[in-house]
Image: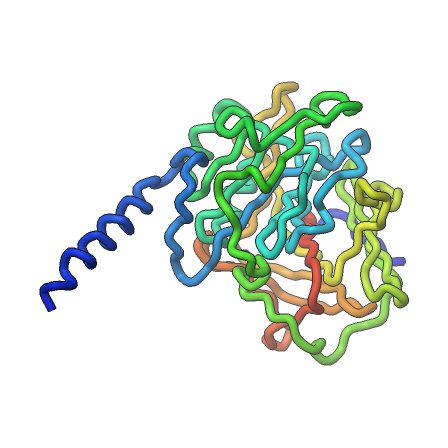
Amino acid sequence: MHAIRPRRPVAAVPVALALLVAALAGCQGGKGAPSSSTAPPASTGGRGHVLAVKVDNVAPARPQSGLDAADLVYVEQVEAGLSRIMAVYSSRLPSKVGPVRSARETDLELLRQFDRPTLAFSGAQSKLLPVIAAAPLNRLTPDQDPDAFYRAQGRAAPHDLYLRPGKAPRVTTGVNAAEDLGLRFAAAVPGGRAVTGRTVRYPEASLTFTWSAGERRWLVSMDGTPARTADGARLRAADVVVQYVTVRPSAYRDKWGSTSPYTETVGSGSALVLRDGKEYEARWSRPSAGDTTEFTTPDGERMTFAAGQVWFVLAPK
């Protein structure tokens, strides 16, 4: 087991006019439009609509619900050296996701890779709320859409808030969100080295991915404990991307006064890609926030992935 430490004709005129009016009506939401709008957003650049949910990742929040149905799972560092998850859905929706927690500034830049996604979150630091409202995404919160959320019995606050994706006002496309990012599912690139697992450490949290040859999946552990679904099954990933990034203080603080870290996902750097029991050296590049993140081999060849759920662990470099 290896360990890593901190280091994206005229008769047709009335019909045409009616279609134009309808199309314009469907696009009037603009930035920060209420998430109660039921019209799907116009597509830009061919990228589809996704649902992203901020999910708690401390011990009292486990086992989480709905993570196993996500197309993509992002892990980022938050206050006090802990970690938090953003699960991204498009190909399928679970009956519930949670516990749902608050958004961070990092999420806004990360989600620019998608075409106006919906972000479900419990709230945010007061000074960050107008920034979220101005971001090119659809907000989904208990205040805006109370029918989409509920408080679970037997869970202590703040680990008791759950989302019912089926009641969310905007639907997903049914296309794997990995395609929105341009990830290529294909045979593995040459090379790689066989590994039994990999651990990524934050100051006060860790994630371990252990290869199961029988299941042909990476079994997930959190803080040294096997991570499971609410039904007791192990969380499993087809691919794991350890993306080395700059993590710096942001301008925001939590209610206890701790500075929120900001994870930079625009730029370039090194990465490790875990697939099929091997670990591959890689490079990542995202020139601007409007671009998706490209992963390549050290020789510049496009990285390929095994079909299935992909975890991105944003690790301090």
* Residue 116 x/y as whole percent: 44, 48
Q: Quadrant of residue 167?
A: top right
- The quarter of the picture where the N terminus appears is bottom right
Say how the picture is coloured: rainbow
* Residue 166 x/y as whole percent: 59, 42
Check the image and report above or below for 152 versus 118: above
Q: Residue at position x 48%, y 43% from top?
A: 170
Q: Residue at position x 86%, y 62% from top?
A: 211
Q: Is residue 7 left or right of residue 30?
A: right
Q: Is residue 6 visible?
A: yes
Q: Residue at position x 70%, y 23% from top?
A: 158
Residue with the most extreme front position: 11
Check the image and report above or below for 55 versus 185: above
Q: Residue at position x 49%, y 47% from top?
A: 117
Depth check: give the residue in front, 173 or 289. Answer: 173
Depth check: give the residue in front, 163 or 124. Answer: 163
* Residue 234 x/y as whole percent: 84, 50
Check the image and report above or below for 212 versus 235: below
Q: Quadrant of residue 254?
A: top right
Residue with the most extreme top position: 256
Q: Is residue 109 left or right of residue 7?
A: left
Number of numbered discs present? 0
Q: Quadrant of residue 25?
A: top left
* Residue 72 x/y as whole percent: 64, 54
Q: Is residue 317 visible?
A: no
Q: Is residue 73 left or right of residue 14?
A: right
